[in-house]
Amino acid sequence: MSEVKTGQIRSGSADGSQSTSGLKGQLGTLDIALTTLAYAGPLAGTAGYITFVVGFGNGLGAPSAFLVVMAAFLLFAVGYSALSRFVPNPGAFYAYITSGLGRAAGLGAAFMVLASYFCIGVGFYGFAGLAFQDLVVGWGGPKIEWYFYSLIFWAVVGTLAYFHIAVSAKVLGVVLIVEVLLALMFDAAVMVQGGAEGISLAPFTWEAFSSGNVGLALIFGGALFCGFEATAIYREETKNPDKTIPRATYLVVLFIGCFYALTSWALITGLGNSQAVALSTANTATAFFDVSKVFVGDFFYKIVTLLLITSIFASHLSIQNATTRYVFSLAIDGVFPKALGVAHSKHSSPARASLTCSLIYLLLTASMIFAGLSATKIYAWFCGLASFSILIAMAITSLSAIVYFRRNKHHPVNAWQSLIAPGLSLLTLGAMILLAAENFATLIDDSQALADVMMYGVVLTFVFGFIYALWLKKSKPHIYQRIGRQMRDDIVKDQTDFNSLKPLNLR
């Protein structure tokens, strides 16, 4: 069992004990991995993102780009997983940055990450509505406004997210397995038939990797990994979290990297090395489906277009689960209204927080519709913004890992876990953030002026949380002390009675 330091609330342990928050669960490594992988939406990423990386990124070097991003995120996972063993507080980025860099930085990061999760959700509602509309029209149905389909997604996702995480995990697991099998069927069919021009290892050469816009390829490749950090969010609902969370984190990163490297190679092979870039540029939205028809058949194409909807649905459900648990953790700490930090008496789920997130998603998406934004624009703007924010949060977490282990030298971790890997992660993520900033206008498919405003907005979100924490320190110290779940087990008797808690003399 991991050591629980003074000033921290027990959130789960190797013996299966549960947190005082009221959340309960017995999720294993595979459960968490499947739930988190659904966030990445493998089939949706294959159909929508890979062709963009090939057409507008580094061309034939797309498979190599995915492997490079995987290596960078594996470095991040080393420090992240080490923190998960010694910081048993739920909240992932929020808890880990608080433990290393202090409460103000932790709350700033929490606000920034929470905003990014809401951005991803809003962006995906645009994507979902558009994909559903295309499916209905393609199958001979009437053309109905995309946001009516988004409303269906919203209702179903909100309903499932209300119940125990095990319900979502089962649904996400089934959907994920089916979509991965279909993608692997596509890969096998193309490779067995030799593609359009034969199988080549050219996509894995330095010449291919360094061609085109490498920066854009790495940023879009990194976007497909978004959500893997959510493994730690489910700590309270996990059995043996000290082992389960690190295993799930490594498993998710390795799977995403290898999956997209293989599938992008198959897509390039199906298009033909000499034509892959041109065809992906000209037919970004349909290239994958075009290759599917040729090598797997028309029936497979129809099944894939149908299951693309379930893939997007699975991503939505995973996104809402992660967002809900951030809201729940902040409510437990007293930063948000305490009522949102009460678990459902029957389902042991953050039901109130989930309903609140559903309402916020509805209001945000509706405001974008009334503002006249198209589904494509909503998706590009908000998902691009979220990807940028997550990279910054990861970089801050790597720095936090270094600081935390320097201050806690008694922890049994080696230099690789406590300094070298987090340090290399900080450098590589810093480089990716710079590349993202340089290519942000392309990332959101809009003007540089809007790109600058959005990037400043990300920074201001962090600054707002930082300043708010300092205000809490002076005006409501009992809440300030709780930031990042920095409280002792023995004083937390009633999860809803925050006002009765006296300030703690914690550093």
Image (cartoon, rainbow, N blue to C red):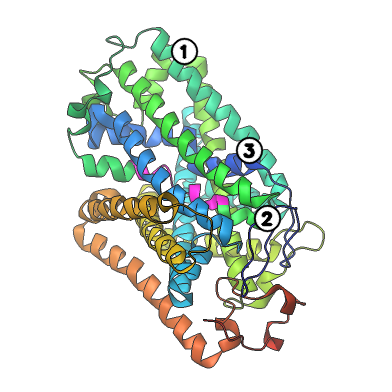
Q: Is residue 223 magenta?
A: yes
Task: Say whether marks 3 and 2 touch (CB < 8 Å).
Answer: no
Task: Say whether marks 1 and 3 touch (CB < 8 Å).
Answer: no
Disc sitting over residue 30 in the figure: 3
Among numbered discs 1 and 2, the one appearing first in the sequence: 2
Q: Is residue 71 magenta?
A: no
Q: Which residue is mark 1?
A: 297
Task: Say whether marks 1 and 2 touch (CB < 8 Å).
Answer: no
**Residue 184 rendering spot, x and y as whole percentages:** 49, 21
Q: Between marks 1 and 3, how big is the CA–CA gap?
A: 32 Å
- Image height of 241 relative to 69, above or below: below
Please give the range of residues in magenta: 221-231
**Residue 141 rendering spot, x and y as whole percentages:** 52, 32
Q: Secondary structure at mark 1?
A: loop
Question: In the image, what residue occupies the spot 58% across and 66% down?
Answer: 327
Q: Residues within 10 Å of mark 3 (few under 14, many from 20)?
A: some
Question: In the image, what residue occupies the spot 42% across and 77% down?
Answer: 466
Disc sitting over residue 1 in the figure: 2
Q: Secondary structure at mark 2?
A: loop
**Residue that protrudes farthest toward the bottom in the picture:** 475
- Image height of 70 relative to 84, above or below: above
